[in-house]
Image (cartoon, grey):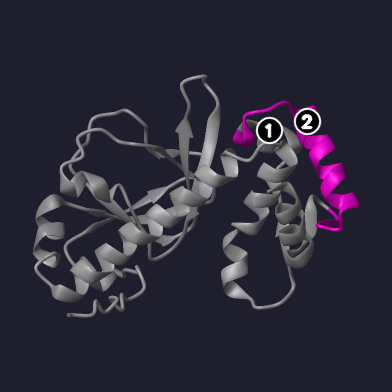
Amino acid sequence: MTTWQTLDLPRPQFTADDFPDAREIAVGQGRFVLFEGEGHQGHCYLITEGQLDVRLVTSSGHETLLYRLGPGELVGELGMFGQRVRTASILAITPCRLLQISPACFKRRFSSDDFRLRIMSLFLSRYQRSHDVICRLGQPTIAAKLCRYLLSLPQWQQISGPHIIVQLGSHSELARMLSCQRETVTRAFKALQQFGILESMENRTYRVHRQAAQMFMDDEA
């Protein structure tokens, strides 16, 4: 009987060297790169500087933040695999520099085994992020949704300590992300602070305590 060996995939990171024929473009803060539902224009993009938010608008009109992308990550790559309509809107939350990658350039790179493995790793990473969003939005209370969001922040991947320091959006911004009222987010913040998950600092900066957050989620399950 053959035993299946798991694949040792590389990190889903890309550089300008992967796309020597790509054209560099600048995108100002607050500008959209792609719009959900628009027809595919034949390009994908590599982020070389800045950060982009990937957002969805639900059928009820609420906007949901899926995840945030940074340097070394691709955006709009599904169009290279036959997706004819953009599946999300992409917003520059900082000034960005992108490489605009044509289908021909992408196809040439796809002949490389290393590149294909990184694309596979990218799809797996996006699936895991999307799963986290589904779990986050499926929690029964706003406090639990907010806690799940805090535990899914990318800063946890950069440290091994018991807490992270993060700057969060306003209660109104978080309410739009969680599809609820601002007052509900305010009550959720108070609950998480009382539980020892959030420790307020200044300028909407908080210390997030992992163990308290995990205990809270266990109690909510």
Please state, as top left, top right, bottom left or bottom right, where the N terminus lies in the image.
bottom left
Q: Which residues are magenta?
A: 177-202
Q: Amino acid at mark 1?
A: Ala
Q: Position of residue 50 (x, y in %)?
A: 48, 57
Residue 153 figure quarter: bottom right
Labelled pair 2, 1 in contact (Cβ < 8 Å): yes
Q: Position of residue 99 (x, y in %)?
A: 29, 57
Q: Residue at x 72, y 47 (%)?
A: 220
Magenta residue check for 57: no
Callout 1: 10 Å neighbours few (<14), some, many (20+)? Answer: many
Residue at the (67%, 36%) spot, across then down: 140
Q: Give the number of the disc on residue 184.
A: 2
> Which residue is at the front of the view, 120 or 54?
120
Residue 132 placement, left or right of 180: left
Image quadrant where residue 146 sits: top right
Q: Nearer the viewer, mark 2 or mark 1?
A: 2
The image's mark for residue 175 is: 1
Three-letter code, disc 2: Thr
Asked if residue 16 shows in the view, the reply is yes
For the residues marked 2 and 1, what is the alpha-carbon distance in whole angstroms?
Answer: 8 Å
The total of numbered circles placed on residues is 2
Let me know if residue 29 appears in the view.
no
Which residue is rendered at x = 70% and y = 44% of the image?
Answer: 144
